[in-house]
Amino acid sequence: IETKNYHGEIGCNRDEWYKKKRRGRKFPIESVSKEAKRHATYLKTFLEKTTEFKMQVNPIVVFTRPEVKLKLQGATIPILRMNELTKCISNTQPATFLSELQLNSIAQSILKHALE
C-alpha cells in the first residue's frame, strides 16, 4: 500500500501522472502507480528469497487527504482514498491462503530485515 499525502488536483492517464497548478496548467509528477508497482515487485522478490514462498503482491495507492481531487483515466492499479481502503481489502479474494506458520515466517523475515 503506497500512501500519498498530496493536495490539489492530481490526475493520471494510465501510468502517467500530473499535478494541476494554478491557471489549469498540468505538470508531470513521478508516476505514483509505477512507484507502487516497483515496491510490490520488491516485496514479492524479497519474500520469495527470504521465506521461499511464492505469492502475489498487489500494489494499491491510497491518497490520505480527503480534499485531494483525483482525475483518473485508465488507472493501472487501484487508486483509493483512505475511506475506501478497508472495503477494498475486505472485498479482495487472496490468490493464495497462507497458514499461520507461513504468516509468522513472513512477519519474522520482515522484522529481521527492518532491524538490519
Image (cartoon, rainbow, N blue to C red):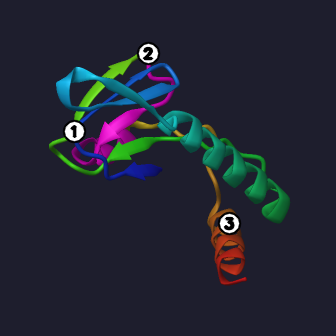
The tag on residue 8 is 1
Callout 2 environment at 10 Å: few (<14), some (14 to 19), or many (20+)? few
Q: Nearer the viewer, mark 2 or mark 3?
A: 2
Cα distance, mark 3 to mark 1? 38 Å
Q: Position of residue 113 (x, y in %)?
A: 71, 75
Q: Position of residue 25 (x, y in %)?
A: 29, 23
Up the image or down, 111 lies above or below 1; here it is below
Instruction: Tell me the residue at 68%/54% (across/down).
Output: 43
Q: Which residue is mark 2?
A: 74
Point out the stretch of residues depicted in magenta.
74-90
Q: Nearer the viewer, mark 3 or mark 1?
A: 1
Instruction: Find out whether residue 49 is within the magenta segment.
Output: no
Callout 1 environment at 10 Å: few (<14), some (14 to 19), or many (20+)? some
Cα distance, mark 2 to mark 3? 33 Å
**Element type at mark 2:** loop
Cα distance, mark 1 to mark 2? 20 Å
Instruction: Find out whether residue 83 is within the magenta segment.
Output: yes
Relative horizontal placement of residue 102, taking residue 86 as reference (left or right): right
Seen from the viewer's position, the closer of residues 85 and 29 is: 29
Q: Amino acid at mark 2?
A: Gly
Q: Amino acid at mark 1?
A: Gly
The tag on residue 106 is 3
Q: Quadrant of the C terminus?
A: bottom right
The tag on residue 103 is none
Q: Earlier in the sequence, mark 1 or mark 2?
A: 1
Instruction: Tell me the residue at 62%/66% (across/down).
Output: 100
Up the image or down, 100 lies above or below 85; here it is below
